[in-house]
Amino acid sequence: MDILYLSQYFPPEIGAPAARVHELSREWVRLGHRVQVVTAFPNHPTGIVPPEYRGRLVDREMIDGIEVLRNWTLAVPNRALPLRVATQLSFPLSVIGLGLPRVRRPDVVLATSPSIFTSVSGLAYARVLRAPFVFEVRDLWPQLFIEMGLVRNRALIRVLEAAELFQYRQARRVVVVTRRFKEILAGRGVPAGKIDVIRNGVDLETFREDAGARAEIRARHGLDGRFVLGYIGTHGLLHGLSSVLDAADRLRDDDGIRFLFVGHGHEREKLLASAAKRRLPNVVFVPGRPRDEIPGYYSACDACLIALRRDPFLAENFVPSKLFEIMGCGRPVVASLAGEGAEIVREAGAGVVVEPEDGAALAAAVRELSSRPEQVSELGRAARRAAEAQYSRRVLAQRYAAILGEVAAA
């Protein structure tokens, strides 16, 4: 089968969208399929294109057997929402104009959100290339921004929702990453029979405990002999990370506990300033690291945090993909969220759940875990077992390929 996959994000960019597309595509190549990925030049989240990619409108390269077709897009930092929308709008214009003439005709066209503008590109490719279209919904755009009050213009909301529903109707199948997403789309009139759930997962060969990296990273950042709670990922508007500083403030007198932040994002500078203003002695900030270093940073932690804002729509319906990477590395999860993500942690016995944005509850959970090393070890083992049994990227890719094969055959 020949699969054409459109995604605005792809390695060497870090983050969940790039990782999902790369790891699924790599597994499909291993299964004997041909995969073309149409994407942008890397620039997320800093807005800086690496030197080796500058000065070109297009590029073609092979990565792990995947043919990657890169196209110019507007590169801006991932900060204000208008800038994000601008770069996302530039993607379909670029990949339709620059990318479409360079692809071979596939058996199926797959486009992934974020954002919904990527699916516009996918639908155009499917029409021109006369191939069936599959829409992969990783985030509920624009509904998330509407629910959180970030988009308020009623006329704009009607246009965006109409465009979204049109794409669902045009897609042969819609693939979502949570059961809640399927329920929401079905409730909006998308036939349940055309919606498939392929959860995010983890590359178990890459994301596993790394004792050597643990020792080196802990020594480098002055973490030896301490219980470390790590937040590793995007420091964004959706994560409510100021409450983590509240928890650190409550535990400032316990020299045996450290809070480790690793990553980039819109809120990082605010968090740095807040920690400095509070003079928190127990918080360590590390800039975003290349993806191949992330398993080592998970391993350096004694437990890892998953956090979302205390917003009913967000907390109940979204499952951060880093959850499965943490589980793969055999680390307990401190889940500051609700809904399906909390259910996954509880069902696996992989950690503890606290209310979103509740600094007091988070501090109590960290204090409790730091005093019970045997429980921490057992939670970590349960997390790895669940990752192996249910969330292997290889197994999920096989299920996904079967769906795409059905679409192509039909």
Image (cartoon, rainbow, N blue to C red):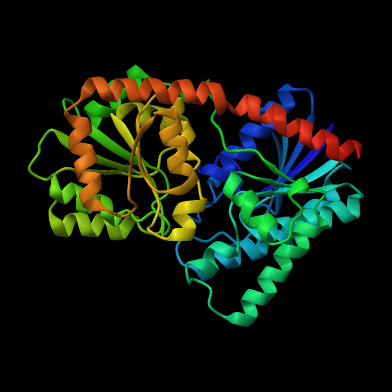
Query: Could you say where residue 96 lies in the image, as x and y percent from the top left?
Result: 78, 58
Foreground pick, 205 / 164: 164
Query: Could you say where residue 33 lies in the image, as x and y percent from the top left?
Result: 79, 28
Above or below: residue 149 compared with residue 173: below
Give the quadrant of the N terminus: top right
Above or below: residue 122 compared with residue 82: above
Left or right, 378 with respect to 320, comes to left
Query: Could you say where residue 219 lies in the image, as x and y percent from the top left?
Result: 22, 26
For image coordinates 63% across by 52% down, the residue present is 183
Looking at this rendering, what residue extends furthest in the left direction? 253
For image coordinates 91% across by 40% down, the residue present is 410
Foreground pick, 282 / 401: 401
Above or below: residue 296 compared with residue 276: above
Tell me if residue 309 can be seen.
yes
Foreground pick, 40 / 355: 355
Q: Residue 389, located in which quarter of the rendered image?
A: top right
Tell me if residue 72 can be seen.
no
For image coordinates 44% across by 53% down, the residue present is 315
- Total numbered labels: 0
For image coordinates 90% across by 50% down, the residue present is 129
Foreground pick, 399 / 14: 399
Q: Residue 350, located in which quarter of the rendered image?
A: top left
Query: Could you say where residue 360 lies in the image, as x and y percent from the top left?
Result: 20, 50
